[in-house]
């Protein structure tokens, strides 16, 4: 006979399977200290990712992914907040599921990257090796962004 306890257990198992499929641990770490440390680390990572939106040499995606991983291991509610956030939610899901990025976000990202790198190289007296390193980094990031699948 089917009862509500069985139904709720099935729903919980389905939710856990969905979280595992998305790369999130369905159960937070057991230690309270570890949970708090992961929440702090996740918050620092998310804040760094937000700063990376405005500073072209500071990556955004990796810090948001680190924040999501930390939240997934420590606080399911913080993970849900981050992945359903109106600013980062679609971005994280699209990147995590390898769907790609929109053409506009690719063009804006690459354009801002080269504009800021160009301004730094033009206005700052830098050693040649620093200029070469900046150009190599900008080229690598541009290639990575260009190779992402384009979402229509």
Image (cartoon, grey):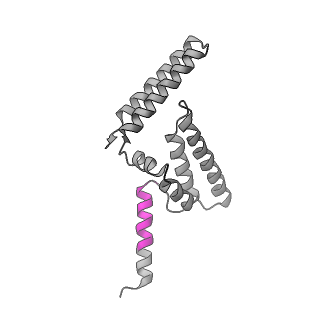
**Residue 42 makes an appearance in the image:** yes
In the rendering, at what x and y percent does residue 41 appear? 63, 48
Secondary structure mostly seen in the magenta stretch = helix
Query: Magenta span has 51?
Result: no
Q: Residue at x 40, y 32 (%)?
A: 107
Compared to 140, does 46 lie above or below? below
Q: Residue at x 54, y 30 (%)?
A: 57
In this view, the residue farthest toward the bottom is: 1
Image quadrant assignment for residue 48: top right
In the rendering, at what x and y percent does residue 124 appear? 61, 16
Q: Residue at x 53, y 31 (%)?
A: 56
In the rendering, at what x and y percent does residue 71 appear? 56, 54
62 on left or right of 95: right
Compared to 86, does 138 lie above or below? above
Query: Magenta span has 18?
Result: yes
Q: Which residues are magenta?
A: 11-23
Q: Residue at x 45, y 60 (%)?
A: 19
Q: Nearer the viewer, residue 131 or 9?
A: 131
In the rendering, at what x and y percent does residue 141 appear? 45, 29
């Amino acid at each position: 006979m089917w009862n509500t306890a069985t139904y709720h257990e099935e729903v919980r198992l389905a939710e856990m399977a969905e979280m595992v499929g998305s790369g999130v641990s369905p159960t937070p770490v057991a230690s309270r200290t570890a949970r708090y440390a992961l929440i702090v680390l996740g918050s620092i990572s998310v804040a760094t990712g937000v700063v990376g939106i405005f500073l072209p040499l500071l990556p955004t995606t990796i810090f948001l992914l680190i924040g999501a991983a930390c939240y997934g291991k420590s606080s399911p509610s913080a993970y849900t907040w981050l992945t359903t956030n109106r600013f980062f939610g679609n971005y994280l899901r699209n990147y995590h599921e390898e769907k790609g990025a929109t053409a506009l976000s690719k063009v804006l990202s690459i354009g801002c990257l080269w504009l800021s790198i160009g301004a730094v190289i033009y206005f700052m007296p830098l050693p040649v090796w620093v200029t070469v390193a900046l150009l190599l980094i900008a080229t690598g990031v541009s290639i990575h962004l260009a190779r992402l699948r384009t979402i229509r």
